């Protein structure tokens, strides 16, 4: 009879075999590393050393993110090649211009021009309505200086009605325009207070949702309205859908406002009525000369003129810099024509008043003066297209004591680059009755285009 080995002896044999296998594996790995190392040394001795830069592979697949807009998805799916190393910051600014990505923006802009359609509710054509003035377009905004700060609100409506983006077929529309004017409501004795304006707007929006089927298809997410008057902040307060879903095009684009949502709403440039573009005083003019008692060069460092009331920041500006010999700072109107301050200064201040926005930003751009923006929480117009750091200076309100140091630290070469970029963006802050490419109307329409969505029910 054959005897079986004790279990303990089998366990010891198995353990020994396992240890032997581990030792053999380690020896093979070490030997492989030794030969690999010497092979690499041999290759290195044959090839001249080079600096190699590795970039991520662009051949892998991406899942499209529905929260991204079209340009962002394009940038994600087709990332640009890595840029060459930049040794000169000024040259980099000149090459890229005032835009984040001009090629991407321009291509998507042309796509918008081919496809975007906007439907305007018929109240804007009804002259028999008792509130016709609230909805009808202004007859001639460019020749009405009384419109002042609310010029952009009226010009958007006029430009839209003269643009090829308008459609009479609502089923083809990407967006629906609610044509009431906050400025006209403010000047109507029947509805002049903020409470009555918000009530009027809520009732009108409710009538639109009950009379037309388009509002309910998206919950109002593809509807928008325009306002530049400060009372427009409270206009949507009494209608839940208008407040949370509809898009507001507003000059008062402040992150601090409770009804302004930067991912949904659009900052509108605040522009005063102007007849045409102004000839600029180039900053590189080395000789100043008098023309009708006015200097024709940029010999002043800073310019600001405005009321101090309702603004602690402006009061601080007056206290700190009101007597500086390189600054022209005025509490109220200047001692010379208002526009001359922009023409003869290198930097022009936009300082928060009652609101974060004023027309001084577009005034500075119009006259070729580098804007200095001292207004916290200001969502600057077209900021997803324009790189404001390339043609303006943004300073936190708490750093106003360092204003002069900051401006004097900008070298002349960099200043000239900023001026060059400023000249390029001037066209984006100009309104026309019949809109023109890349001017204010189409730039604003492009912001709507970026917010388009297919999340709607069938009509």
Image (spheres, rainbow, N blue to C red):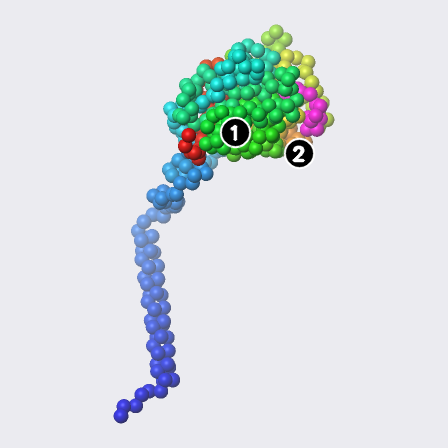
Name the residue beneath numbered marker 1.
247
Label 2's element?
helix
In the current view of this chain or complex, which residue is farthest to the left? 1
Label 1's element?
strand
Nearer the observer: mark 1 or 2; the answer is 1
Name the residue beneath numbered marker 2.
398
- Residue at 36% x, 48% y: name it: 49
- Circle on res. 331: none
> Does the rendering let one see residue 352?
yes
- In the image, residue 439 sits, relative to residue 14, either above or below, namely above
Residue 306 on the magenta segment: yes
> Does the rendering let one see residue 106?
no
Q: Quadrant of the N terminus?
A: bottom left
Crowd around label 1: few <14 · some 14–19 · many ≥20 (10 Å)? many
Image spot of residue 352 (x, y percent): 64, 27
Sequence-wise first label, 1 or 2: 1
Image spot of residue 451 (x, y percent): 47, 31
Q: Nearer the viewer, residue 196 or 257?
A: 196
- In the image, residue 275 sits, relative to residue 35, either above or below, namely above
Residue 154 on the magenta segment: no
The magenta-colored residue range is 300-315
Determine the CA span between mark 1 and mark 2. 32 Å
Q: Nearer the viewer, residue 202 or 257?
A: 202
Q: Quadrant of residue 355 in the image?
A: top right
Q: Quadrant of the C terminus?
A: top left
In the current view of this chain or complex, which residue is farthest to the top? 292
In the current view of this chain or complex, which residue is farthest to the front? 210
Image spot of residue 103 (x, y percent): 40, 29
């Amino acid at each position: 009879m054959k005897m079986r080995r004790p279990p303990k002896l089998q366990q010891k044999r198995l353990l020994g075999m396992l240890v032997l296998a581990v030792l053999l594996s380690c020896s093979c790995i070490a030997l492989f590393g030794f030969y690999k190392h010497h092979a690499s040394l041999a290759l290195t001795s044959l090839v001249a050393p080079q600096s190699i830069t590795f970039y991520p592979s662009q051949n892998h697949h991406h899942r499209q993110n529905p929260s991204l807009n079209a340009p962002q998805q394009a940038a994600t799916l087709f990332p640009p090649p890595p840029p060459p190393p930049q040794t000169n910051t000024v040259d980099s600014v000149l090459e890229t211009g005032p835009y984040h990505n001009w090629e991407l923006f321009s291509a998507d802009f042309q796509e918008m021009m081919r496809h975007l359609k906007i439907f305007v509710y018929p109240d804007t054509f009804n002259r028999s309505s008792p509130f016709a003035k609230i909805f009808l377009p202004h007859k001639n905004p460019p020749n009405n200086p009384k419109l002042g700060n609310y010029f952009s609100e009226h010009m958007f409506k006029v430009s839209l009605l003269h643009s090829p983006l308008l459609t009479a077929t609502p089923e083809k529309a990407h967006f629906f325009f609610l044509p009431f004017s906050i400025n006209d409501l403010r000047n109507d004795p029947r509805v002049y207070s903020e409470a009555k304006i918000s009530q009027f707007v809520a009732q009108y929006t409710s009538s639109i949702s009950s009379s037309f089927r388009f509002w309910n298809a998206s919950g109002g997410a593809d509807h928008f309205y325009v306002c530049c008057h400060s009372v427009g902040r409270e206009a949507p307060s009494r209608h839940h859908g208008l407040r949370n879903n509809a898009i507001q095009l507003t000059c008062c684009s402040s992150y601090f406002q409770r009804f302004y949502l930067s991912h949904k709403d659009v900052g509108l440039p605040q522009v005063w009525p102007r007849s045409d573009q102004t000839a600029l005083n180039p900053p590189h003019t080395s000789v100043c000369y008098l023309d009708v008692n006015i200097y024709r060069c940029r010999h002043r460092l800073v310019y600001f003129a405005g009321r101090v009331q309702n603004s602690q920041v402006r009061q601080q500006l007056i206290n700190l810099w009101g007597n500086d010999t390189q600054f022209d700072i005025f509490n109220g109107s200047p001692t010379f024509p208002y526009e001359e301050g922009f023409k003869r200064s290198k930097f022009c201040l936009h300082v928060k008043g009652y609101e974060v926005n004023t027309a001084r930003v577009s005034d500075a751009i119009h006259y070729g003066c580098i804007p200095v923006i001292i207004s916290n929480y200001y969502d600057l117009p077209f900021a997803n297209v324009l790189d404001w750091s390339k043609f303006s200076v943004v300073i936190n309100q708490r750093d106003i004591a360092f204003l002069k140091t900051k401006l004097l630290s900008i070298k002349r070469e960099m200043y000239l680059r900023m001026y060059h970029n400023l000249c390029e963006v001037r066209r984006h802050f100009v309104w026309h009755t019949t809109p023109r490419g890349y001017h204010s109307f189409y730039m604003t329409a492009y912001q709507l285009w970026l917010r388009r969505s297919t999340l709607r029910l069938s009509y």
